[in-house]
């Protein structure tokens, strides 16, 4: 299967890996980008022809033929967004509990619903999440949860790419913790046939895993060459309790337990100290910032600018829909690029390009896929989104990376390609039954007594 | 002309003016909402019939006939958003200057472009702004700028509703200031035939109008029964300079100059003190908060929660596209409902319902149109937006005001009615030529040497 995207403005990395927007022809062969050929001139709206050179001036030719040809006129090609932290099945809990204190939120509303949730509910929840992400240009997500089989099922069917972590909770060498680890491996082994799926181990957090259990998980990850996905330093309460129990920060504890000897992606780090940042830099830990969730639950603002300065790889996530409430990486990128200017009181903090990097290649790096996804380069997987530039938010057509960060809302995404396959075309999802998903979500709400509920 | 919207979930005010979501039939006769009749049951997805009672239990009947019938199945009816502070023509400057310090932003980029701007440029800029607002459910905006004739022209043609202020700059009784006042009156008089247009006087800010000129404007407003639209306490520099020159805060200065003896809408107030809030409460001054702009220019976060506590009427605006960069009130509402939870470190600060109120009825109140727009009530103008609930961001269909604040992005808006006329239907704009607007914006960019420019 080959796809040729002709005459499209594309957000490409230049030799210094900074973004440039150039008009190009892009060829996809099977699952990979096989050629990128620049067109004459790079201004939008100008009729151009294949110039026969790639971004580095080398002679190339994309040809004019392919199984599928996409006209790139008035369109923008970007690498698909990488949502580096979410809990996909929670999409059906989008509006069930808002404007509540954390304990009322979790124990009063979220937990009882999770208790009532069946396998099928988890499956349709994951489907709704994937639908929302795909429709807003996300092509890969990093997930943590309990019922991972239903998510891998939805990922396989939908054509999405994902990294899945079975949420692990445990105390020392207990049977419950061991059972959860077994589930993680079983699912990994069962999904070996799907190239779009990979697996991390997911010790949930220092307040749900004790140090001994974290140590076991660290060793398991090492033995199995798996990455670690964990929540760290999300709330002030977590820090306080961690100091009481262990005499150190959650980040220092995770390091002490050996988790960081494995490639680690740490969600939140709202309360990371300079010492924590030093540890994370040295151990190559990636941080996923989740601005909406951190604000919505009243945890505050992560020290993103300071973490970037410390050399930590910072990437971007939405968290679950129960605490965001959107899984739209464009909304999240807008928040990321705005809020730190507010807290630092300077317009020169987290630029549009830095934000876009966190939403794409930095997430790929955190998920051990830097060489495969996260940017538009020959040899990488064809994980791409095509935006319509004839929309108010993308007009005028200049400084388009700024438009991606500050004015786009995700609905500009028209076509999505994952692993070389078109999964959405002109906003029609080709790999999932959108109507069916809404029907099943409605059915679940009725069953749970939440249908049409208002607070 | 009559419109009947049948069987639609509607965000209605209850007897205490709190929001409830109920299924209803809504009839529009000419420019007004003439009847609202509740349907049996209020859950979505349930087949219901006109119950013959309105929200207060009174017998009613919407009938079944109208010039235009809109099926409300799987749709949500909301009052159109009121964008309470913007500079519409700046839409064409959306991405020209981002991530820059304020002086580089204003004097290095924005001002030179404004200097090169013709009447036609201002007209197409206003058109792009109105297009963006209409497509994201805004039905009224409050504008301040220099070339108001081009904006009133675009407002008249597009069917939008607006309050227009000629930006006034002046020192004492100078001729330039007097000329600007004359232009304000001329435009007001010339637009008398358009019911959708009203006019405020717009003394720009205490750093561009001296106290004597503000005094003149205050008297002119009183004489002409006009409201005041002003920027106040936006940046730390403004406060510092105001204290140096006048020995008081900008808000205290505006009060001292008599401006607040007129209905006043004050943009920003990021640095409002408790004393300022007291003055504004006593003088019934409304504050427009513009979260994106305040963050993007590095000014910080307005004390919205404190102003609300003080009893000040707080409403919501996008500011101009040069400092936001979107004119999408859904994006702005999301920011408003999230950031103050972040700064206050509590989930219980600016709830979804409070945010939605600021985006609608509070803006109407600030613009002296509380009795005419801002909520769905019999006798009010039919300024309405209809959202598609079969979109991931609105699923599941419960707690829909939370969905409006936290997960909607504006693209869910399908149909817009302003002054009883359908201006957008199934996302097609009926009153403007969308393609032409993009063409003209492209032409302007080329002329200004900004076409396809990247930084």
Image (cartoon, coloured by chain):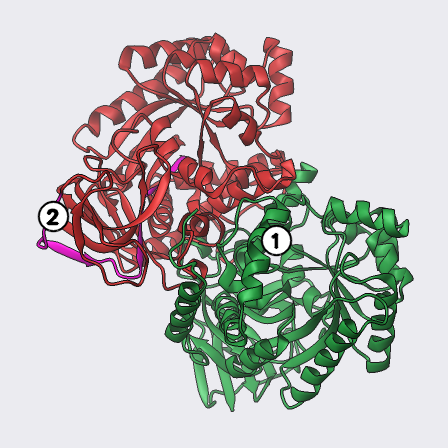
Chain colours: A red, B green
For residue A100, side relative to residue B76 (left or right): right
Q: Nearer the viewer, residue A307 or A395?
A: A395
**Highlighted magenta segment, given as a residue range:** A60-87
Say which mark, if any, is on residue B333: none
Is B260 covered by the magenta stretch?
Answer: no
Q: Nearer the viewer, residue A201 or A65?
A: A65
> What residue sits right under mark 1 in the picture?
B107
The structure residue drawn at horizontal position 43% and vertical position 80%, both measured from the top left corner, is B430
Residue A328 in sight in this render: no
> What residue sits right under mark 2 in the picture?
A2
Task: Estimate how packed mark 2 is, as few (under 14), some (14 to 19) or many (20 or more) residues with alpha carbons within 10 Å.
Answer: some
Q: Quadrant for residue A338, please give it.
A: top right
Rendering coords of residue B163 (x, y %)? 66, 74
Is residue B402 depicted above or below A206 in this figure?
below
Rendering coords of residue B391 (x, y %)? 40, 58
Rendering coords of residue B386 (x, y %)? 49, 70
Q: Quadrant for residue A228, please give it.
A: top left
Marks 2, 1: nearer the viewer: 1
Task: Estimate how packed mark 1 is, as few (under 14), some (14 to 19) or many (20 or more) residues with alpha carbons within 10 Å.
Answer: few
For residue B357, side relative to residue A327 (left or right): right
Residue A293 in sight in this render: yes
For residue A444, side relative to residue A294 (left or right): left
The structure residue drawn at horizontal position 56% and vertical position 26%, both measured from the top left corner, is A306
């Amino acid at each position: 299967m080959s796809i040729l995207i002709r005459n499209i403005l594309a957000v490409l990395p230049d030799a210094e890996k900074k973004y440039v927007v150039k008009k190009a022809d892009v060829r996809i062969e099977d699952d990979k980008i096989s050629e990128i050929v620049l067109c004459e001139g790079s201004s939008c709206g100008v009729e151009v022809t294949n110039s026969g050179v790639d971004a580095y001036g080398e002679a190339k030719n994309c040809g004019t033929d392919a199984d599928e040809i996409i006209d790139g006129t008035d369109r923008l090609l970007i690498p698909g967004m990488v949502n580096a932290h979410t809990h996909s099945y929670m999409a059906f809990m989008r509006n069930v509990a808002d404007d509540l204190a954390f304990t009322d939120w979790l124990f009063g509303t979220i937990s009882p619903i999770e208790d009532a949730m069946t396998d099928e509910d988890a499956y349709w929840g994951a489907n709704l999440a994937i639908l929302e992400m795909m429709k807003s240009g996300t092509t890969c997500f990093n997930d943590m949860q309990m019922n991972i089989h239903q998510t891998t099922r939805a990922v396989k069917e939908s054509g999405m790419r994902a990294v899945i972590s079975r949420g692990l909770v445990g105390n020392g060498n207990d049977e419950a913790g061991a059972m959860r680890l077994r589930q993680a491996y079983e699912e990994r082994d069962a999904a070996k046939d799907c190239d779009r799926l990979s697996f991390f181990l997911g010790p949930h957090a220092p307040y749900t895993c004790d140090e001994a259990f974290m140590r076991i998980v660290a060793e398991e990850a090492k033995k199995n060459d798996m990455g670690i996905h964990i929540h760290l330093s999300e709330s002030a309460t977590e820090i306080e309790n961690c100091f009481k129990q262990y005499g150190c920060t959650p980040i220092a504890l995770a390091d002490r337990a050996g988790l960081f000897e494995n490639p680690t992606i740490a969600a939140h780090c709202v309360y990371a100290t300079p010492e924590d940042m030093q540890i994370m830099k040295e151990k190559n830990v990636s941080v996923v910032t989740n601005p909406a969730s951190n604000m919505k639950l009243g945890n505050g603002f992560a020290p993103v600018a300071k973490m970037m300065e410390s050399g930590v790889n910072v990437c971007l996530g939405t968290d679950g829909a129960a605490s965001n409430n959107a899984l739209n990486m464009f909304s999240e990128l807008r928040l990321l690029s705005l809020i730190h200017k507010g807290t630092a009181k300077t317009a020169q903090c987290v630029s549009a390009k830095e934000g876009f990097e966190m939403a794409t290649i930095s997430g790929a790096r955190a998920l051990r896929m830097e060489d495969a996804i996260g940017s538009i380069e020959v040899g990488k997987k064809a994980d791409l989104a095509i935006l319509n530039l004839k929309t108010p938010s993308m007009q005028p057509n200049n400084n388009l990376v700024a438009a991606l960060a500050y004015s786009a809302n995700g609905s500009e995404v028209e076509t999505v390609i994952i692993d070389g396959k078109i999964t959405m075309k002109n906003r029609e999802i080709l790999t999932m039954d959108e109507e069916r998903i809404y029907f099943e979500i409605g059915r679940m709400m009725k069953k749970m007594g939440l249908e049409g509920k208002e607070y």
